[in-house]
């Protein structure tokens, strides 16, 4: 018994080393998910950034039909990558609104001209006030908001072709 | 020569994580007018995690998002909110992960209890030695 107890500190140290090795082998990047999934969306009202799309407010996302809310920026590479997938979602009849993060009107117009324009409303969020209210920490991110204004789903990062089915499913589930 | 080309490539390369062309928010780099409020805001910023440059506090980071988070903290403190209210607002959205000051809750209590438990265990292991020396 006493012998065994003498080994205890070494045993604890071994456990500590294992914990460190496990921690080091994991990716240091943590994906920060919004805590607001299943909760009402925050109140906000954002002005338009380009003339051909009205601005976006929380009331626009509570009109009975679920909607996609795409958080994007013209200066964000992955946002361009996901454009074909957003156009595909629009083609399947899913309405998409957007929040443009830290962006300028001429840049957004050029971005939409170059990569296609799947959006109905686009609100301008120059200082991330609304992005932070959503618990979103980067671009692109896509939320699904149901017709009553409850946030149902958050997709972090660009929507790749293999994600489209998953988004459609989450959208149908929000009906 | 190769070194020069490599250095030039490093200097000229555009960053993979592009940042926007907009100037930073007003209070990202500007202190609050009231020094007492600024001190409160600064103390809070040092305990909030930058979400895009993980491992740094928002007080330490030059990322756009950290600047906007500083602006948010300063504007809310300026409007009269208590630092803990601002922290709670962020934790409600991003989870306890955004805060460097871990709350005492079931998930974190081992963290708080571990030093006491380890010290107790050490004393218990060493108790025989003390007894022998006394005797």
Image: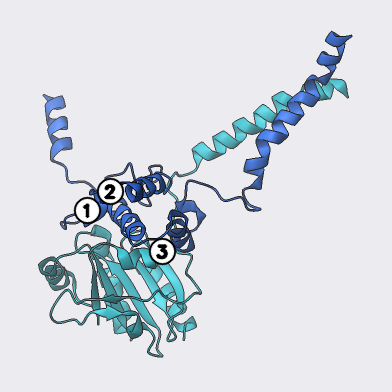
The x and y percentages for residue A105 are 13, 69
Q: Are marks 1 and 3 in contact (CB under 8 Å)?
A: no
The x and y percentages for residue B59 are 34, 44
SS label for mark 3:
loop
Q: Nearer the viewer, mark 1 or mark 2?
A: 2
| Hue used for the chain lettered B | blue
Above/below status of A172 relative to A46: below
Query: Does residue A164 appear anywhere in the picture?
Result: no
Q: Residue at x 82, y 24 (%)?
A: A4
Above/below status of A30 relative to A34: above
Q: Which residue is mark 1?
A: B19
Quadrant position of the N terminus of chain A in the picture: top right
Q: Closest to the observer: B37 or A51?
A: B37
| Distance between mark 1 and mark 2 Cα atoms | 8 Å
| Hue used for the chain lettered A | cyan
Q: Nearer the viewer, mark 1 or mark 3?
A: 3
Q: Which residue is mark 2?
A: B63
Q: Residue at x 22, y 53 (%)?
A: B19
Q: Earlier in the sequence, mark 1 or mark 2?
A: 1
Dot 1 alpha-carbon crowd within 10 angstroms: few under 14, some 14 to 19, many 20 or more: some
Query: Does residue B51 appear anywhere in the picture?
Result: yes
SS label for mark 1:
loop
Q: Residue at x 31, y 44 (%)?
A: B61
Residue farthest bottom in this picture: A64
Quadrant in the picture for residue B127? top right
The x and y percentages for residue B68 are 29, 56
Q: Chain of mark 2?
A: B
Marks 1, 2 in one chain: yes
Q: Residue at x 38, y 42 (%)?
A: B56
Q: Which residue is mark 3?
A: A135
Quadrant in the picture for residue A110? bottom left
Q: Chain of mark 3?
A: A
């Amino acid at each position: 018994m006493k012998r065994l107890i003498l080994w205890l500190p070494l045993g604890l140290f071994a456990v500590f080393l294992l914990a460190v090795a496990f921690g080091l082998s994991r990716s240091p990047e943590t994906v920060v998910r919004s805590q607001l999934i299943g909760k009402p969306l925050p109140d906000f009202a954002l002005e338009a950034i380009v003339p051909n799309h009205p601005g976006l407010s929380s009331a626009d996302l509570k009109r009975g039909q679920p909607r996609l809310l795409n958080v994007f920026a013209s200066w964000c590479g992955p946002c361009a990558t996901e454009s074909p997938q957003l156009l595909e979602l629009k083609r399947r009849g899913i309405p998409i609104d957007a929040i443009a993060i830290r962006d300028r009107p001429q840049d957004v117009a050029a971005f939409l001209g170059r990569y296609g324009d799947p959006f109905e409303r686009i609100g301008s969020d120059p200082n991330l006030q609304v992005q932070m209210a959503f618990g979103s920490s980067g671009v692109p991110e896509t939320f699904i908001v149901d017709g009553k204004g409850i946030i149902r789903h958050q997709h972090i990062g660009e929507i790749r072709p293999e994600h489209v089915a998953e988004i459609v499913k989450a959208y149908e589930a929000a009906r | 020569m190769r070194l020069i080309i490599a250095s030039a490539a490093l200097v000229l390369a555009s960053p993979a994580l592009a940042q926007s062309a907009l100037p930073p928010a007003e209070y990202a780099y500007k202190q609050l007018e009231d020094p007492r409020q600024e001190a409160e805001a600064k103390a809070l910023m040092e305990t909030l995690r930058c979400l895009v440059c993980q491992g740094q506090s928002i007080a330490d980071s030059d990322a756009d998002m950290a600047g906007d988070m500083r602006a948010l903290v300063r504007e809310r403190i300026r409007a009269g909110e208590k630092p803990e209210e601002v922290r709670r607002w962020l934790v409600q959205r991003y989870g306890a992960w955004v805060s460097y000051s871990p709350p005492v809750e079931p998930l974190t209590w081992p963290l708080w209890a571990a030093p006491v438990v380890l010290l107790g265990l050490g004393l218990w292991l060493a108790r025989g030695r003390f007894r022998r020396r006394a005797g």
